[in-house]
Amino acid sequence: MHKLSEVKDSITLIEEKLPETYEGFKNMSRFEQDGIYKNIEFVIQNILDICAIILKEKDLRIPSSDYDMLTILKDSGVFTVRAIETINQMKSFRNRLVHRYGELDDELAYYNIKEGLNDFHIIFKDIKNIIVSDQ
């Protein structure tokens, strides 16, 4: 799936550019920080898009929202409860990045990204297993 490849490329870029410490992140230019944020937004949105594609390919009912889509995927056994909870957390984080509810706390965002990078790899593995099992 081409979309999955694009997402993995963005994660690789984030991993290469994200400093090891918050101090390093804080010392980056706003432009560089925003580049990391935009790549995270891109990755999370594309994970949701991939979920929508899987839902359609499995011919499951039409969802009324992203939350409903994820519930359908969980209830039908396509994704584990843990995977759906993780995707929902990613979606909430993406909403904070996109809409900048209040002022974004760069330190909290940095640690969410740093700690969440492994979650992306877990979700990719689940998606790849779903795609392979359908072939």
Image (tube, rainbow, N blue to C red):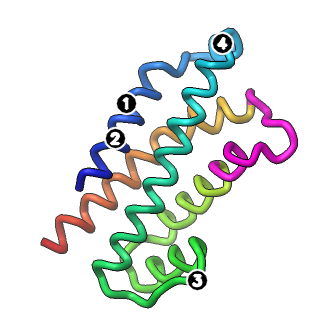
Q: Quick one: label 4, few (<14), some, or many (20+) residues within 10 Å?
A: few
Question: Measured from the top left, where is residue 90 in percent x and y?
Answer: 58, 53
Q: Is residue 76 left or right of residue 65?
A: left
Q: Is residue 95 above or below residue 60?
A: above
Q: Which mark is residue 29?
A: 4
Query: Residue at point 32% right, 42% down?
Result: 6
Residue type (three-letter) at the residue carrying disc 1: Thr
Label 4: element kind: loop
Q: Is residue 22 above or below residue 87?
A: above
Task: Residue under label 1, please give it.
Answer: 12
Q: Are marks 2 and 1 in contact (CB under 8 Å)?
A: yes
Give residue 53's quadrant in the image.
bottom left
Query: Residue at point 55% right, 16% down?
Result: 19
Residue sitting nearer the eye, 15 or 46: 46
Alpha carbons under labels 1 and 3: distance apart: 33 Å
Task: Give the magenta-colored segment's residue range.
Answer: 94-107
Residue type (three-letter) at the residue carrying disc 3: Ser
| Badge nearest the viewer, 2 or 4 | 4
Q: Which mark is residue 64?
A: 3
Give residue 38's quadrant in the image.
top right
Label 1: element kind: helix
Question: Measured from the top left, where is residue 63 in percent x and y?
Answer: 52, 83
Q: Which mark is residue 8?
A: 2
Q: Are marks 1 and 3 in contact (CB under 8 Å)?
A: no
